[in-house]
Image (tube, grey):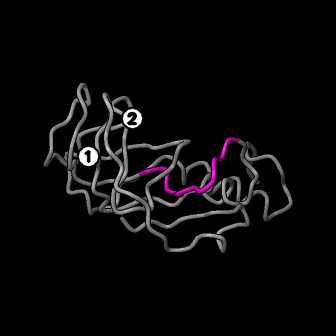
């Protein structure tokens, strides 16, 4: 399968198109064909080496939406179901296929191609606003 792969930590520029074998779901996991993957600050942090625990090679992408291709025993989903999943901290979303754990996947009641609102912008925007104004506290206004 095709993946966006980081074989070294060096920021977003270290990600290259690569190939890896198709993953196989174990018990409690689903194999998801990725239709969309979110890009978040944690991906940038991992790639820059600023967050511990990265095993190389690393496939970024912590949030995905897609369709279940196969499911291990106890995965709680069936092939053909649309799901969205949080892959943090393992990553793996910038790939054609990824593994999602049963405790981190949810049925997708909407189409998996439509964007889904996340609470992250409500955190990121105020912090960015205050930091660009020289105020390091994201909890104050004015």
Taking the view exactly as shown, the residue that stands out farthest to the front is 21
Pointer 1 local density, CA inside 10 Å: few below 14, some 14–19, many at least 20: many
- The reply to whether the magenta stretch includes residue 54 is yes
Residue 64 in the image, given as x and y percentages of width and height: 38, 53
Residue at 50% across / 67% down in the picture? 4
Magenta stretch bounds: 53-63
Q: Is residue 90 left or right of residue 31?
A: right
**Which sits in the foreground, 78 or 17?**
17
Query: Is residue 101 positioned above or below 45 on the image?
Result: above
| Pointer 2 or 1: first along the chain | 1
Residue at 59% across / 56% down in the picture? 57
Q: Alpha carbon of mark 2 to alpha carbon of mark 1: how far?
A: 10 Å
Query: Is residue 30 positioned above or below 56 on the image?
Result: above
Residue 33 in the image, given as x and y percentages of width and height: 27, 56
Q: Quadrant of the C terminus?
A: bottom right
Q: Which SS class for mark 1?
A: strand
| Residue named by callout 2 | 104
Q: Which SS class for mark 2?
A: helix
Residue 67 in the image, given as x and y percentages of width and height: 22, 52
Q: Is residue 38 left or right of residue 72?
A: right
Query: Is residue 70 positioned above or below 4 on the image?
Result: above
- The reply to whether the magenta stretch includes residue 138 is no
| Residue named by callout 1 | 83
């Amino acid at each position: 399968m095709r993946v966006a792969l980081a074989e070294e930590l060096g920021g977003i520029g270290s990600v290259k198109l690569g190939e890896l074998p198709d993953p196989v779901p174990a018990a409690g996991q689903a194999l998801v064909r990725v239709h969309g993957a979110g890009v978040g600050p944690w991906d940038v942090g991992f790639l820059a080496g600023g967050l511990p625990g990265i095993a190389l090679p690393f496939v970024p992408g912590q949030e995905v939406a897609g369709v279940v291709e196969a499911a291990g025993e106890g995965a709680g989903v069936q092939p053909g179901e649309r799901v969205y999943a949080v892959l943090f901290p393992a990553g793996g979303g910038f790939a054609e296929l990824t593994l999602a754990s049963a405790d981190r996947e949810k049925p997708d009641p909407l189409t998996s191609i439509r964007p889904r609102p996340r609470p992250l912008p409500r955190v990121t925007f105020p912090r960015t606003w205050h930091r660009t104004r020289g105020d390091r506290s994201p909890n104050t206004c004015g």
